[in-house]
Image: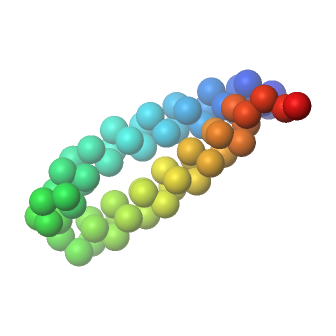
Amino acid sequence: MTETEELKQLKEELFQLENKMRTLEWDYTREQINPYKKQVFEGMLKEKDQLVSKIEELDTPEE
C-alpha cells in the first residue's frame, strides 16, 4: 500500500469514527452517559488521537 492510499484509508477511518462519536460526545459533555458507554467513548478518543497522529505523520512533507 502506498503512502497516499494509507493516508486516504486513515482519513476515512477517522471520518467514520467521528461519526460514531457524535452522539456519545453529546451525552458525555452533558454528563448523561452511562459508565459502559463512557468507557467506549474514551476508547474512541484514544483511537482518534492515534489516527490523527498517524495522519499528521504521513501528511507531513519530507524535507
Kindly give the residue lying farthest to the right in the view shown: 63
Residue found 38% across the figure and 41% down from its top: 18
Give whichever of 41, 30 is nearer the camera.
Answer: 30
- Figure check: 29 above or below 18: below
Residue found 14% across the figure and 66% down from its top: 31
Residue 19: which quarter of the image?
top left
Residue found 34% across the figure and 70% down from its top: 39
Residue found 71% across the figure and 26% down from its top: 5
Residue 3: which quarter of the image?
top right
Q: Position of residue 41 (x, y in %)?
A: 34, 60
Q: Position of residue 13 (x, y in %)?
A: 52, 38
In the picture provided, is 38 more to the left or to the right than 2? left
In the picture provided, is 28 more to the left or to the right than 32? right
Quadrant assignment for the N terminus: top right
- Figure check: 38 above or below 58: below
In the picture provided, is 16 more to the left or to the right than 58? left
Kindly give the residue lying farthest to the bottom in the view shown: 35
Q: Position of residue 63 (x, y in %)?
A: 88, 31
In the picture provided, is 60 more to the left or to the right than 46? right
Q: Position of residue 62 (x, y in %)?
A: 85, 32
